[in-house]
Image (cartoon, rainbow, N blue to C red):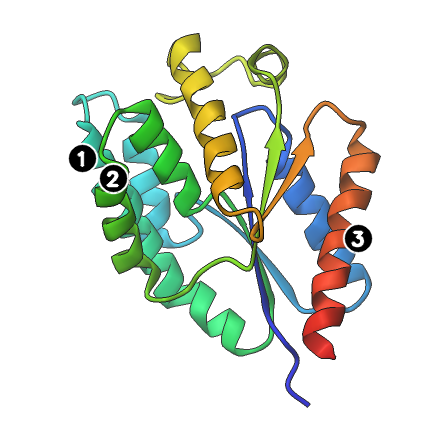
Amino acid sequence: MNIPSLFITFEGLDGCGKSLQAKLLYRHLKKISRKAILLHEPGSTPLGEEISRLVKWGDTTRLSPVTELFLFNASRAQLVSETIKPALAEGTVVIVDRFTDSTLVYQGYGRGLDLDMIRQVNDIALQDCHPDLSILLDTPLEVATGRRKKTSDRFESENDAFHRKIRSGYLDLAESEPERWLVIDGTLEINIITDIIIEKVTLLLETDED
């Protein structure tokens, strides 16, 4: 019997709790003996980690928004080819902390690049590998800022106006494609958020197995 795969992405402001919830979902799936893998963007491959250091922490040059767009998608293309597609082909639940929607909101809503252009570049990197479920932990900026680490990368260091555009962008994307998105109040208790996510993922897995 072929075990159905599932591709899940987590999105939201830095400090929204997405990385924690991605880990908790991964642990739950492993606990119930479901094959799963946890990844993050940019990164999760040797090339991706190099790009992550450059685009998030590099201070030798100021990257243009278009350069950011192509660097993130270079990392993504490698991750899709090297890890995501092979894992999905084996019936693995793939969980990724940030994916194409981050590029749409950060380089589009945040930096001002044309959304259609971003989608075209994203699609090249995706290689027809699209998420089945995207989970948005919608969190007020003030709450997310208070949760963030004291050390901030290039994006976390942006002003409040930038981050408000990011949150607005995520909500726009979720509203435009409600069948793919699960929007959760990021201020809820951690265990409540986890329960909501597990319930949704369990339903999707059961549906695929029918």
* Quadrant position of the N terminus in the picture: bottom right
> How far is the residue under mark 1 from the one under mark 3?
38 Å
Above or below — where is 178 with respect to 33?
A: above
Q: Residue at x 56, y 52 (%)?
A: 180
Question: Label 1 amino acid?
Answer: Val
> How far is the residue under mark 2 from the one under mark 3?
34 Å
Q: Residue at x 27, y 24 (%)?
A: 111
Q: Are marks 1 and 3 in contact (CB under 8 Å)?
A: no
Please say whether residue 50 is visible from this viewpoint. yes
Image spot of residue 62 (x, y percent): 18, 21
Q: Nearer the viewer, mark 1 or mark 3?
A: 3
Disc 3 crowd rating (10 Å Cα; few below 14, some 14-19, many 20+) is few
Residue 66: numbered disc: 1
Q: Are marks 1 and 2 in contact (CB under 8 Å)?
A: yes
Q: Quadrant of residue 126?
A: bottom left
Image spot of residue 199 (x, y percent): 79, 53
Residue 209: numbered disc: none
As drawn, is 141 to the left or to the right of 173? right
**Which one is in front, 199 or 159?**
199
Q: Quadrant of residue 137?
A: top right
Please say whether residue 56 is visible from this viewpoint. no
Question: Label 3 amino acid?
Answer: Glu
Residue 199: numbered disc: 3
Secondary structure, mark 1, is helix
Pick whichever of labels 1 and 3 is earlier in the sequence.
1
- Residue under label 2, please give it: 69
Q: Quadrant of residue 58?
A: top left
